Amino acid sequence: MYICRYTIDKNSIRIGFVDNQQVYDITARFPSITAFLRWTIGRTDAGSALRKALHGTQPTAPLSSVTLLRPTDEQEIWAAGVTYERSRVAREEESANSGIYDRVYRAARPEVFFKATPSRVVGPMEPVAIRHDASWNVPEPELALVINPAKELIGYTVGNDMSSRDIEGENPLYLPQAKMYGRCCAVGPMIALAEHVADPKNLTIAIEIQRNGAVAFAGTVNTSKIVRSFAELIDYLGRDNLFPDGVLLLTGTGIVPADDFTLESGDSVSITIDGIGTLHNPVIRGGA
């Protein structure tokens, strides 16, 4: 069971409930993702409740016939860092300030940072960007937590945290420039409702980067390698923070390309998470 934003024939944006590869239009009840997230407050059975309410209703369209959009509207994107051992090692190696990533990996308080405003986020098949002033750019495939205004976890989607490793590596204080810019984040294709995902700490994340018709990079990791609980990450995210529209939290990456790899304009990035979906995005170079 999933929630999506979609269009048919490029008409108005609709909100859909997806069940058995069929889309049910629920826009009249939930005109936005924000409205849906607010409705889920206090519910652990959102998908089952919608399925029951739609019983006997004919689906609007097969999932294969609609155009999926990013499954967010007014939600901010935040991110947790250094949640996998591989990420800790890679960021230590790229940084001229060794030790800080090791300390946060072992610290009580996790690294949680602001990633993107809604206008900087793209959805399925939309281009992600690499910075024009960076020479070492990588995608970071991540499981994204979808959280309602009461800071309750209600679902999951696929996330791509685009990053400029050379900028952050030069000085960790440059992290906002390395992480936050136009088209710096992609999410989608849909929100898998939490009750649909049996064990979110046992999901395979796979990435494949195509270049000129060939595989330039591929890798996999399992979310069991995340060293912190999702409840812990949500707790720290929510401290002294309000999210009236809900929020998405990226949970870190455990797939890091070799140091001699960088994304190029024209590449295509595909990220797949078991039971969640596959997020495809072409790559462009950002403007000055």
Image (spheres, rainbow, N blue to C red):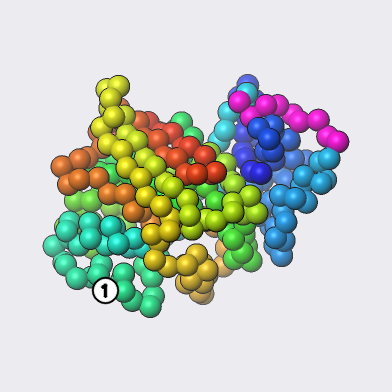
Image quadrant where residue 215 sits: top left
Q: How far across and how far down the image is residue 118, in percent?
A: 50, 48
The answer to whether residue 133 is magenta is: no
Q: Is residue 60 above or below residue 111?
A: above
Q: Is residue 261 left or right of residue 221?
A: left
Q: Is residue 287 above or below residue 90?
A: above
Return the residue nearer the eye: 189 or 255: 255
- Identify which residue is drawn at 26% across, 74% down: 103
SS at badge 1: helix
Q: Quadrant of the C terminus?
A: top left
Q: How far across and how far down the image is residue 148, in percent?
A: 62, 59
- Residue extending furthest left? 96
Q: Quadrant of the N terminus?
A: top right
The answer to whether residue 59 is magenta is: yes
Q: Is residue 39 above or below residue 126?
A: below
Q: Is residue 17 left or right of residue 159?
A: right
Image quadrant where residue 53 sits: top right
Q: Amino acid at mark 1?
A: Arg
- Identify which residue is drawn at 27% across, 62% down: 88
Return the residue nearer the eye: 259 or 28: 259
Q: Is residue 11 above or below residue 147?
A: above
Magenta residues, start to end? 56-64
- Identify which residue is drawn at 64% across, 66% down: 150
Q: Can residue 183 be seen from the camera position used here? A: no
Q: Is residue 234 left or right of residue 220?
A: right
Q: Which residue is mark 1?
A: 103
- Residue extending furthest right? 56
